[in-house]
């Protein structure tokens, strides 16, 4: 298992938290998703083989938010 912290722009409310948590949580291999609105971060515990970081980024961006490198 790996823990990845992503900087995400555009999240501002509990709807944002629910959208990102739901989308990323559906990815096979993800065991936990935590969103911090104040820090603008999404922390994901995942199996890198089943849930590569590119897949996680895609799911966040698919919800309309920007993952910042």
Image (cartoon, rainbow, N blue to C red):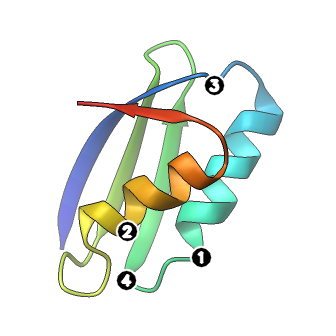
Q: Position of residue 18 (x, y in %)?
A: 75, 47
Q: Which mark is residue 55?
A: 2
- In this view, the residue in front, 68 or 20, is 68
**What is the C-alpha distance between the residues marked 2 and 1?**
11 Å
**Screen quadrant of the N terminus:** bottom left
The residue carrying mark 1 is 26
Q: Is mark 2 in CB contact (under 8 Å) with mark 1?
A: no
Mark 2, residues whose alpha carbon is within 10 Å: few (<14), some, or many (≥20)?
A: some
Q: Nearer the viewer, mark 3 or mark 2?
A: 2
Return the disc, 4 or 3, that comes first in the chain's sequence. 3
Residue 52 lies in quadrant: bottom left
Mark 3, residues whose alpha carbon is within 10 Å: few (<14), some, or many (≥20)?
A: many
In the image, residue 25 sits, relative to residue 7, either above or below, namely below
**What is the C-alpha distance between the residues marked 3 and 2?**
19 Å
In the image, residue 20 sits, relative to residue 14, either above or below, namely below
Q: Is mark 3 in CB contact (under 8 Å) with mark 2?
A: no
Q: Nearer the viewer, mark 2 or mark 1?
A: 2
Return the disc, 3 or 1, that comes first in the chain's sequence. 3
Question: SS class of the residue under badge 3?
Answer: loop
Question: SS class of the residue under badge 4?
Answer: loop
- In this view, the residue in front, 40 or 60, is 60
- What residue appears at the point 37 percent right and 44 percent down from the top-left corner? 43
């Amino acid at each position: 298992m790996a823990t990845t912290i992503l900087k995400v722009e555009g999240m501002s409310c509990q709807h944002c938290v629910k959208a990102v948590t739901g989308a990323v949580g559906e990815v096979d291999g993800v065991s936990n998703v935590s969103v911090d609105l104040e820090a603008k971060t999404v922390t994901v515990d995942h199996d890198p083989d089943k849930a590569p970081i590119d897949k996680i980024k895609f799911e966040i961006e698919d919800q309309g938010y920007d993952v910042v490198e």
